[in-house]
Amino acid sequence: MGARIAVIIALSTLFSYLHMRHALRKETLAQLQQHVSERGQREEAIFLQAEDNHAFLKKALLERIRTLQSQQEDVNARFDSLFTRLPDGTIRNRPEILDGTRMVQLFIPRNAALDAGLRTRLMAAHDVLTWYGPAFHVRFKTSYIAFPEGAIVGFWPTDPTWSQALPADFSVTQYEDYTLSTPEKNPQRRTIWTGIYKETVSKIWMVSVATPVDLDGRQIATLGHDLFLEELMTRTIKEHVPGAYNVLFRDDGQLIAHPDLKLASATVAYNILSDASRPDVADRLLDTEEDAAHLRELFERLESRQADQATLEIPRYDEYVAVTRLRGPGWNLATVLPESVLSQPAFLAARYVLLLGIVSLLVELAIMFQVLQQQITRPLLNLSQATDKVAAGDFKVTLDTARGDELGQLARAFQLMADEVQRREEALRQTNEGLEQRVEERARELKEVNQQLVQTARRAGMAEVATNVLHNVGNVLNSVYTSAQVAKERVKGMKLEHVSRVAHMLEQHQEDLSAFLSQDERGRHLMPFLNGLGRNLVEERTEIVSLLDDVGRYTEHIGDIVKVQQNYARTPRMHEPVNLAELLEDALRINSAGLTRHHVKVQRNLTPLPQVMTDKHKLLMILVNLVSNAKYALDEAPSGERVLTVKLEQAAADRFRIDIHDNGMGIAPEMLTRIFQYGFTTREEGHGFGLHSSALAAQELGGSLSVHSEGLGHGATFSLEVPFAPVQPSTHA
């Protein structure tokens, strides 16, 4: 029962773990997707703001150009007051008036043709950035306007000398943001975002947004913002769901942010697709090649997902991934959650369930122990003490026979056995006394024999009584009980009341008895009735005597079972003539109730043998045990196929053999060497001493008990070999 409860607790723990893991997985993945979606909305805000800024700047720049086109003299004067050509041929801000923390700066390469139209566009860009650059600087580090001639006008207060630091051959048209804004690369004329790069002057990783400005069908400028990525990378790496990590990448495989990405010493960005096969790059920018392969598989799974699939499972790495797309640059923000983060809470909860289950099991076992102590152990102890008293020769035992369970039945049967043994001992004593009175010449011999019998009986069962007596007696009690019940029914069925009626009738007509018997109708039928009643009573008496003979034999065998457990070292057993075939029938008859109940068919193959001198009751005890064990072994066979085969033959000139074969459950090879060990049994209700005591009894008879089985499902054969000592014919007349 404890084992079954433990299995239930284990299954409950497993189901609890699976249920909680499923619920946590569903809830956590929903929260993960919500987190990624909300995070994406926050991160994309600055990109959308940059595009709004460009739309505003584009409109303001075109309006300013149109305004300045009619003020060319004022444009030239202002231009010359702010900018000058330096010895290297470039045009830059005048150094003597430059305050880069507040002023817009300009750079024109030396090979640019500075005509009136370019001057107008440059001054319009200068004015627009002067007006709106400080406001944009709150969110964007730089704001600039590039021109097809290679010139650039920008507001970058955090680097006040950036225009003075540019080399003389610098041209803004060489940069990706300008190239992507040209009509060839951007025919839709929309705002575009570059990949991440390290700026040449500040050595800071950034990304640029560019919007082309066309006038009269020709590109006249490109608006731009530079967005420093340090804060975005830091947020992406540090701000994450507990236990998870974030990854930011472009559709072309360019990696923007990753916990293991090391861009401090790099000059170009890491590409998930192209650089994963380059071990030197992977080891330098990531931790290991395995991390690069892991990242590539993650990227490929995300790129191949369905459009509406926001959450993916990667079984190879036991991870779940939620991804969202940042509007503006079109970057992908992914959050990777290891499966262990989901299973750990479920495991902890299941552990508490298991702990509570174990505590409950211990409480249940404690209660069970108390119940078994009161209901099983104590009654068995009383029964064991009663067997000790019976073994010591004291048959006056008192047991609790009021119980209605199996222990109560056993106690009643044992009480009946003890009373019957006591009655038989008393009858034996009285018989001996009568024989002494009738046959004085044999009194001494009978007295000595009686004393030897009493002494032998009182020494019975001093070893292994507590186990062997109960086991062997139990095999016979069913037959004793069955015969006694049948005899009881026979006695109840005897028509003794008719005798009283006949006697009463005769008493009424005793004065005219002759006339009554010859003339009265009832009297004429009285004598035939008495004859029939006499025959019926004789038949009933014969059957009852036969049943009581059976009870006597079984009871005698019960008494002898007690005796054979005694120490034979003091008083050797007496051998007697035994008909082996009849002894086998007795063993089958003792087990007949169980064989019938188990639907066992008995086949006999008995070779006629003369009577042999042996210990009858010890041999019968062995056979009863073997037949009983075979009966239980046949429970595994189908009901209509249960066959018990009994074989008797002379194995050699000096030995005979009895085989008990069943086609039942069989015996595993590894069990054959242990089958006769004390305490070993294959039945849950078995005690493991029946075969052990039988093997010992066979040795005491000078023989042996062996077993053979082809394995489980092939039945088993127990072979008993005993010395063959035929009864010698008497030579006396």
Image (cartoon, grey):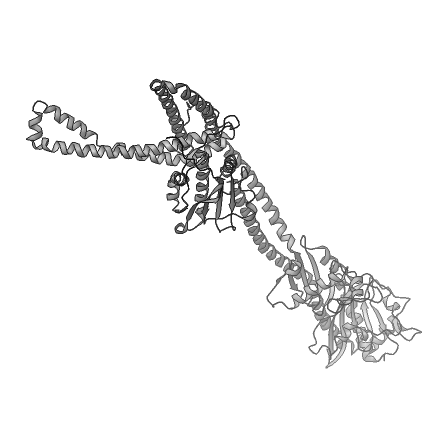
Q: Position of residue 426 (x, y in %)?
A: 37, 22
The reply to whether residue 379 is visible in this rendering is: no
Task: Say above or below: 387 vs 125.
Answer: above
Q: Position of residue 63 (x, y in %)?
A: 73, 74
Depth order, front residue of 712/615: 615
Image quadrant for the C terminus? top left
Who's the residue at 84% across and 67% down the image? 200
Left or right of 77? Residue 400 is: left
Q: Position of residue 287 (x, y in %)?
A: 77, 59
Task: Say above or below: 571 vs 200.
Answer: above
Depth order, front residue of 633/80: 633
Task: Say above or below: 68 vs 555.
Answer: below
Where residue 130 sits, quadrant-wise, is: bottom right
The reply to whether residue 544 is visible in this rendering is: yes
Who's the residue at 53% across and 47% down the image? 12
Depth order, front residue of 3/441: 441
Depth order, front residue of 706/212: 706
Where residue 93 sits, quadrant-wise, is: bottom right
How many callouts does the rendering have? 0
Q: Position of residue 443 (x, y in %)?
A: 39, 19
The residue lying furthest to the bottom in this view is: 217
